[in-house]
Image (cartoon, rainbow, N blue to C red):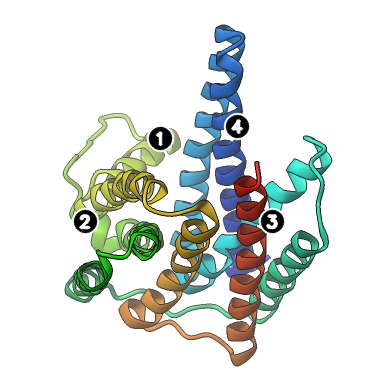
Amino acid sequence: MSCMILSLILAFCGYSLHNLGQAGQKVGLGLARRNWAAGAAVWVVASLATTAAAFLLLYAVSIGSVTAVGAIGGSGLASLALFSHWVLKETMNRWAIAGISLIFVGSGLIGALSRPMPAVHPAPQTLFAFLGALCLLFVALWVALRRRQSAGGIVIAGFAGALGGVIPLFQKISTSEFGRARSLLELEFQTPGRFLEMVEHGAEILSNPFALAWMGIAVSSTVIMQFSYGRGAAIRVIPSFAANFITVPVIGGLVCYGERLHPLQWAGVALIVGGVLLLTLQRGAAAGSR
């Protein structure tokens, strides 16, 4: 199995585990109101799942394309919808089925046409310039639309999604030789061994400035998204988050790492974005009707 295909499989598992973990956290909090111990147990397991998802995605990005990994970011929503239908016995309408189908067809196109990527030659200044440009763009949108309550929520959610989409870009450079060489934690073991080498390698990946940056960005994205809920209905803010979460790493991979997609892979990206919008819109409408 090629590294590119393995990367996409790991990314699919990572995004699915992340979304399922988030749903599990909500279930745990609800259960805790009736049975604290059981609710806490569910919440802890779900939180461990989201943590494991972050490491799966980190490894997926390290061996594959940021653009391709980011493009299938909506696959987790499809997995969550299927889990909700099969396990939680939630109803699934034709729009949800269409959305799931589009996501899987789009992911299949991206995977089938994936090719080995050239070696990464990180340019930190380009990466930080890209992040700065995104921040300026959303600040400008906020200033222009701040008087419109519903538009403000969409902009805030979009910013949260854009920050979430930047994470794979920083993960890529944090796992490269360039990033590892700038580790802030140097471990030197006297006794050589495979396990100790893995520990040392892991410390280099997780303690360099780029790793600390993506961890901080992840926290910021989560916090900012909470503000969007108070300024707009879920049916508006969730699609805004999801669309930016998928498109930003695709654009960032092209700009920051010089990656390229086959024309049919671009069609796959469009199908995934469309499928995510169908899923989030119909789920938002269902939530708004309750």
User: Is the Cβ of the residue at disc 2 closer than 8 Å to that at disc 1?
Assistant: no
270 vs 37: above or below:
below
Q: Residue at x 26, y 46 (%)?
A: 216
| Residue 66: percent from left, percent from top | 45, 69
Q: Secondary structure at mark 2?
A: loop
What number is the disc on residue 104?
A: none
Q: Which residue is mark 4?
A: 24
**In x, y percent, where is residue 113?**
66, 82
Q: Of tags 3 and 1, which is closer to the observer? A: 3
| Amino acid found under the numbered disc labelled 1 | Gly
The residue labelled by disc 1 is 193
Residue 274 appears in the rendering: yes
- Which badge, 2 or 1, is on the more N-terminal residue? 2
Dot 3: what SS? helix
Q: Residues within 10 Å of mark 3 (few under 14, many from 20)?
A: many
Residue 78 numbered tag:
3
Q: Which one is closest to the eye, mark 2 or mark 4?
A: 4
Q: CA distance from mark 3 to mark 2?
A: 38 Å
Q: Nearer the viewer, mark 4 or mark 1?
A: 4
Residue carrying label 2: 181
Front in this rendered view, residue 144 or 245: 144
Three-letter amino acid code at disc 3? Ala
Locate the N terminus by quadrant: bottom right
